Amino acid sequence: QVQLVESGGGLVQAGGSLRLSCTASRNIFSFSTMGWYRQAPGKQRELVASLTGGISTNYADSVKGRFGIFRDNAKKTVYLQMNSLKPDDTGVYYCNQVPPAQWGQGTQVTVSS
């Protein structure tokens, strides 16, 4: 079973940027669609970005044009670059396969207004 460890979260002002990282215990990216999910306070977890084959990306409408997902196979890491952050982006961010398997601990992102 693959272990996923997220990092890079923090507190940032609106308009700022963060880059999240997700490192896997083994390389699953070549044959899996990977995604970043977000769980905002009081809301259900949602998929905000996904990457298939290292090339094909999809984004939730709420983050389109502001977030970018990409990977580094050699580092067994998938990233989420988040720009122009808004308070509505606040939440715990998780990476996982699509559809999801076992969840990691996530990383907290807080955007202040």
Image: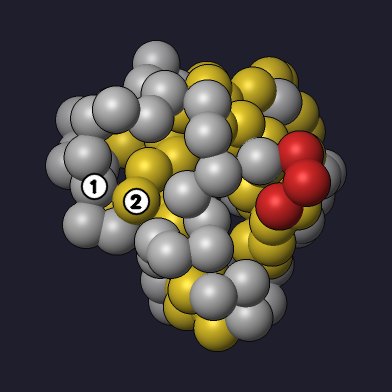
Number of numbered discs visible in the structure rendering? 2
- Please say if 14 is above or below 49: above
Q: Residue at x 45, y 40 (%)?
A: 95
Q: Split into 4 quadrants, where in the image is the N terminus?
A: top left
Who's the residue at 55% across and 44% down the image? 27
Mark linked to residue 100: 1
Residue 48 in sight here = no
Q: Quadrant of the C terminus?
A: top right
Q: Residues within 10 Å of mark 1 (few under 14, many from 20)?
A: few
Residue 108: where, in percent of width, then height?
52, 21
Q: Quadrant of residue 65?
A: bottom right
Question: For this rendering, which residue is in front, 95 or 75?
Answer: 75
Inter-mark Cα distance, 1 to 2 = 5 Å
Mark 1: amino acid: Pro
Q: Position of residue 72 (x, y in %)?
A: 76, 52
Residue 5 x/y as whole percent: 53, 22
User: Which residue is at the front of the view, 62 or 80?
Assistant: 80
Residue position for label 2: 97
Rendering quarter of residue 24: top right
Q: How is the image coloured?
A: secondary structure
Residues tagged 1 and 2 counted as in contact (Cβ below 8 A): yes
